[in-house]
Amino acid sequence: MLKIQAFHDTLGEDFKYLSEDEEVTSHNLYHKLNNKEGLEMEEEHGQSELEYLNIIRDVRDNEKQLYEKIKKLPQKSKSGRVIPKLEQDQTITFLRKGGLKKFFISNGEDSEEIYFYEAMKYLRVDKDEKKITPPKEYFDHLELNKLAFEIALTEEIIDNEKPTKTGNDLKIIRILRVLRKDTRFTDKEEETIDKLIKVWEDGNIPASITKDVLKQIKGITDSLRIYYQIISLVPNKYLETRREDKKINISGNTKVILSSYLKKGEE
């Protein structure tokens, strides 16, 4: 069951079907997999994360041998595949330390964090696709991904220890406070700005999103344009009311949940 839980964790924080602090046990995972009403819900924006729980459910119900095989896979599972339109060979890795879960991709020169749906474009395959054996370059890529994760982990530790917000978070908070003074916003938009200020003050926005926001609004002077740009970049889940604010648990050892070598193929 631990391996199924690990693959379930691959859905990451973007997966809204489970509450943030809910442990995935044999009992409640069984409940989630059988909750037909929940599985049929549609997300308000874009492709639904529930699609991936549906895949697990379908494998469990219709491909029992494959389901058992997945359960018995060891940690640090690795594989490889050929992607025709890939610009260069890369390796994608899903890492976890406590409650901190991130995807990184490396081309051998550097490593960068990618979002959930970007990762799924590389990891989702047809069942008949043949895997390849990762070459020795895979291990260089993996080390870069692990190093990038450790750097991200250091940023999380620093953020958790800060009594006040500084750096990029503080820049965003100051920008939002200036926006709040613009009289053109509706009551609902003002309420949203207040929520944005709160989530950044509480440190709930990942550093990668904060950096992206600052990059995209650079040079924009109109308050309305800045507001809508920020809204388009911040996932709605961060604005939802939470039962309680908790710091991310980053205790325990760093774990490589899965990793895949991506080989450039002929188009």
Image (cartoon, helix red, strand yellow):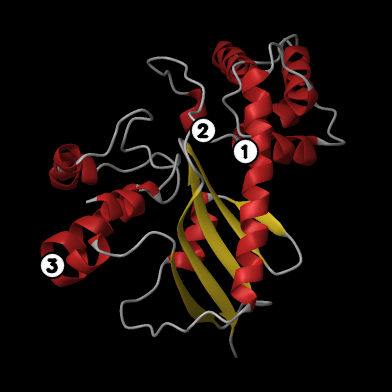
- Residue 66 screen position, x and y as percent: 20, 70
Label 3 or label 1, whichever comes before in sequence order: 3
Task: Check residue 20 in the rendering and tell me which mark sits there, or answer none.
Answer: none
Q: Dot 3 corresponds to which residue?
A: 64
Drawn side of residue 61 relative to residue 263, left or right: left
Judged from the image, the secondary structure of the residue bearing numbered disc 2 is loop
The reply to whether residue 137 is in sight is: yes
User: Residue 16's quadrant in the figure?
Assistant: top left
The amino acid on which the numbered mark 2 sits, given as a three-letter code, is: Ile
The amino acid on which the numbered mark 3 sits, given as a three-letter code, is: Lys
Q: Dot 1 corresponds to which residue?
A: 153
User: Residue 166's quadrant in the figure?
Assistant: top right
The reply to whether residue 209 is in sight is: no
Task: Give the alpha-carbon distance from disc 3 to disc 1, as whole Å.
Answer: 37 Å
- Residue 86 screen position, x and y as percent: 62, 77
For the residues bearing labels 1 and 2, Cβ distance under 8 angstroms? yes
Q: Dot 2 corresponds to which residue?
A: 250
Drawn side of residue 4 relative to residue 224, left or right: left
Drawn side of residue 218 relative to residue 248, left or right: right
- Residue placed most toward the observer, 212 or 137: 137
- Residue 189 screen position, x and y as percent: 59, 18
Disc 3 packing (10 Å; few <14; some 14–19; many ≥20): few
Q: Residue at x 72, y 24 (%)?
A: 169
Task: Give the alpha-carbon distance from disc 1 to disc 2, as whole Å.
Answer: 8 Å
Q: Is residue 87 above or below residue 242?
A: below
Label 1 or label 2, whichever comes before in sequence order: 1
Q: Residue at x 71, y 12 (%)?
A: 164
Q: Is residue 228 above or below residue 185?
A: below
Q: Quadrant of the C terminus?
A: bottom right
